[in-house]
């Protein structure tokens, strides 16, 4: 499986990458929201899963998710966030 991680905390992104690669997955990571969205829009057919942080520099994970879905891209997106309010979680599902 090929996975794209969009996470601005480099230590967390590297740890996820290492763990997933040890399970046989190919993993790329980006640390900026605009760059992450651009990669998804251009290369979405290259990935089987996106792991997406909500609080990113450049563009929020909320906006990335909305833009990707509006573009008709239906790749699975796993939200990774430190936000814990129910309202924030529900907003990510829209």
Image (spheres, helix red, strand yellow):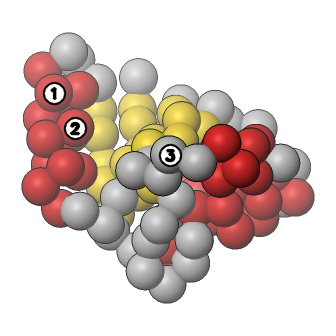
Q: Are marks 1 and 2 in contact (CB under 8 Å)?
A: yes
Q: Is residue 53 left or right of residue 10?
A: right
Residue in the picture at 17% in, 62% down: 10
Decide: few, some or many residues near mark 3? Use Cα within 10 Å; few <14, some 14-19, many ≥20: few
Q: Quadrant of residue 90?
A: top right
Residue in the picture at 83% in, 48% down: 94
Report the residue marked by disc 2.
16
Image coords of residue 7 (percent x, y) = 35, 58
Total numbered labels: 3
Viewer-side label of 3, 2: 3
Most distant residue in the bottom direction: 58
Residue in the picture at 52% in, 59% down: 54
Q: Is residue 3 left or right of residue 40?
A: left
Judge whether 16 appears above or below 19 on screen: below
Q: Are marks 3 and 2 in contact (CB under 8 Å)?
A: no
Q: Which mark is residue 72?
A: none
Q: Is residue 20 left or right of residue 71?
A: left
Decide: few, some or many residues near mark 2? Use Cα within 10 Å; few <14, some 14-19, many ≥20: some
Judge whether 23 appears above or below 66 on screen: above
Viewer-side label of 3, 1: 3
Most distant residue in the front direction: 85
Pick the quarter of the image with the N terminus: top left
Judge whether 54 appears above or below 19 on screen: below
Q: CA distance from mark 3 to mark 1?
A: 24 Å
Q: Quadrant of residue 25?
A: top left
Report the residue marked by disc 1.
19
Q: Are marks 3 and 1 in contact (CB under 8 Å)?
A: no
Asked if residue 36 can be seen in this view, the reply is: yes
Q: Secondary structure at mark 2?
A: helix
């Amino acid at each position: 499986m090929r996975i794209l991680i969009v996470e601005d905390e480099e230590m967390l992104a590297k740890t996820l990458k290492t763990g997933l690669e040890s399970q046989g997955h190919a993993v790329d990571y980006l640390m900026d929201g605009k760059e992450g969205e651009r990669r998804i829009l251009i290369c979405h057919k290259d990935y089987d899963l996106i792991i997406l942080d909500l609080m990113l520099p450049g563009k929020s994970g909320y906006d990335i998710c909305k833009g990707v879905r509006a573009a008709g891209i239906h790749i699975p997106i796993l939200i990774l966030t430190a936000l814990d309010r129910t309202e924030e979680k529900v907003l990510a599902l829209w």
